[in-house]
Amino acid sequence: MPPLPPVTKALLLICTAIFCLQQFLPLDPWFALWPLSSGLFWPWQLGTYGFLHGDTLHLFFNMLGLWMFGSELERLWGTRRYIQLLIASVLAAAVVQLIFTLLTGSRAPTVGASGGLFGLLLSFGMLFPNRVIMPLFPPIPMKARTFVAVFGGLELLFGLTGGSGVAHFAHLGGMLGAWLMISFWRGKLPFGGPRRR
């Protein structure tokens, strides 16, 4: 197995360390993403929420996805573009979630790196559409593009039906942010301009 690239390795360590801190310090009131109407929202939460996690399983699956998809993408893109993609995904996820909570009147905070992870997932599906992967659930081998389509569809379905306590629209927002960033790099709509690498 190749060594972990630096940004992915740093994120794995930082998220795990912050999760340990969460067990002793009340970080959520300051660093979770709070709805605009809650009176607890601060601008830095647009980024800091992505480093917090709700429980051990939440952390485990996000870090597993970061390792599975992020490592290869960082090796392919290099540090700079990889960080740009992650920032775009996390910010877009936050904005979509804020709009969703504003429209629904929800006052629950959002935590987790899932927005960034879903951005990586979409990116992996766009760059390696025919790569066969084996998800933990369901344990059925499928092409990356199929995996992305299935999970994107499920997120939309669960988001519309609601009631699960999971920020499904934040996940979709992360995918949107990744798609916009890759489209920008490629000079495609909605950005136009010359085609890029």
Image (cartoon, rainbow, N blue to C red):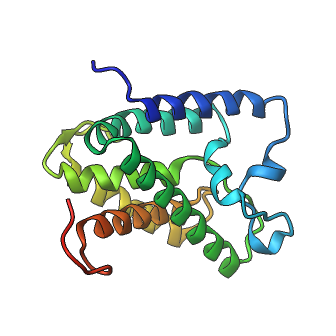
- 125 relative to 14, above or below: below
Q: Percent position (x, y) of residue 143?
A: 18, 47
Quarter location, residue 186? bottom left
The correct choice, above or below, for 53 with respect to 171 in the image is: above
Residue 35 location (% of width, % of height): 74, 68
Q: Quadrant of residue 177?
A: bottom left
User: In the image, what residue occupies the spot 62% across and 63% down?
Assistant: 163
Figure quadrant of the N terminus:
top left
Residue furthest left as drawn: 130
Q: Report the residue at 84% width, 29% height from top.
A: 24
Residue 45 x, y percent position in the rendering: 71, 57
**Residue appearing at x 24%, y 39% in the figure:** 140
Above-or-below relation of 71 to 193:
above
Image quadrant where one finds the C terminus: bottom left
**Residue 146 shows up from this direction:** no
Marker count (numbered)? 0
Judged left or right of residue 101, residue 196 is left
Q: Hey, which quadrant is residue 172 in on the image?
A: bottom left
Where is residue 99? Give x, y as percent: 62, 76
Please state if 126 lies on the left or on the right of 167 as rendered. left
Who is closer to the viewer here, 30 or 55? 30
Depth check, front residue: 40 or 136: 40
Along the horizontal axis of the image, is 56 left or right of 82? right
Residue ID at (34%, 20%) = 3
Is there any visible trace of residue 24 in the rendered image? Answer: yes
Image height check: is 156 above or below 68? below
